[in-house]
């Protein structure tokens, strides 16, 4: 991120990217916090806030879970020998029991694993919050919109009373 004076400001803790479409397109039943297998330049790029996780999804690969189609932009000061690919598959770092559970759900119930948030912890570690859920159809999406509009209307009415 660039501040008013044109200096590059790094994100030390907090939210880097959020997938707001995921909760609209999927019914999320469970969430897991996973680490990411990243290179140094990718971490520095994340600290600059250069990430997009809206089109991401995860799939099992043997005994691992791989996140696909998330974009981590190029780092400004990266030299040509250490350049990383923006959309490469990245391994999720989870506990063995969580990996087995996700693989079982993926194979048995045909769930979708989507990224919800990418953030840095207080210790400075990059974490990805992933959600497990089923895709919604058009009727479910309309119901979600109706519920959201009713919440806004109810809050507006309560505010005026």
Image (cartoon, rainbow, N blue to C red):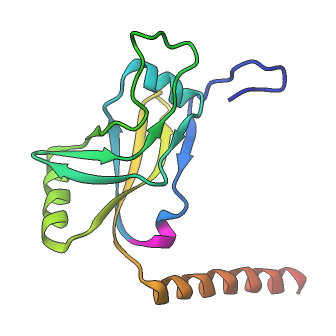
The answer to whether residue 27 is above or below residue 138 is above
Does the magenta portion include 24? yes
Specify the farthest residue to the front: 80
Left or right of 13? Residue 100 is: left
Q: Residue at position x 56%, y 12% from top? A: 77
Q: How many marks are shown on the rendered structure?
A: 0
Q: Report x, y in % for residue 150.
A: 68, 87
Q: Nearer the viewer, residue 137 or 80?
A: 80
Q: Residue at position x 54%, y 88% from top? A: 143
Left or right of 11? Residue 28 is: left
| Quadrant in the rendering for residue 87 | top left
* Quadrant showing the N terminus: top right
- Tell me where the magenta segment starts and ends, as one range: 23-27
The answer to whether residue 108 is above or below residue 10 is below
Q: Report x, y in % for residue 142.
A: 55, 86
Q: Report x, y in % for residue 145.
A: 60, 82
Specify the farthest residue to the left: 62
The answer to whether residue 8 is above or below residue 15 is above
Q: Residue at position x 48%, y 9% from top? A: 79
* Quadrant showing the C terminus: bottom right
| Quadrant in the rendering for residue 39 | top left
Does the magenta portion include 30? no
Q: Main secondary structure of the magenta part?
A: helix
| Quadrant in the rendering for residue 160 | bottom right
Specify the farthest residue to the right: 160
Q: Report x, y in % for residue 31.
A: 36, 59
């Amino acid at each position: 991120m660039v501040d008013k004076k044109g200096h590059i400001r790094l994100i030390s803790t907090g939210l880097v990217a959020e997938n707001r479409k995921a909760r609209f397109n999927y019914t999320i039943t469970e969430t897991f916090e996973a680490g990411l297998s990243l290179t140094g330049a990718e971490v520095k790029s994340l600290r600059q806030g250069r990430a997009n996780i809206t089109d991401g999804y995860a799939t099992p690969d043997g005994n691992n879970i791989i996140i696909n189609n998330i974009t981590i932009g190029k780092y400004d000061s990266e030299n040509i020998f250490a350049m990383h690919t923006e959309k490469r598959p990245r391994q999720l770092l989870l506990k063995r029991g969580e990996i087995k559970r996700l693989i079982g759900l993926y194979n048995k119930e045909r769930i979708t694993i989507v990224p919800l948030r990418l953030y840095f912890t207080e210790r400075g570690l990059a974490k990805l919050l992933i959600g497990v859920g089923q895709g919604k159809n058009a009727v479910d999406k309309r119901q979600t919109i109706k519920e959201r509009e009713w919440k806004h209307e109810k809050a507006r009415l309560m505010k005026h009373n």
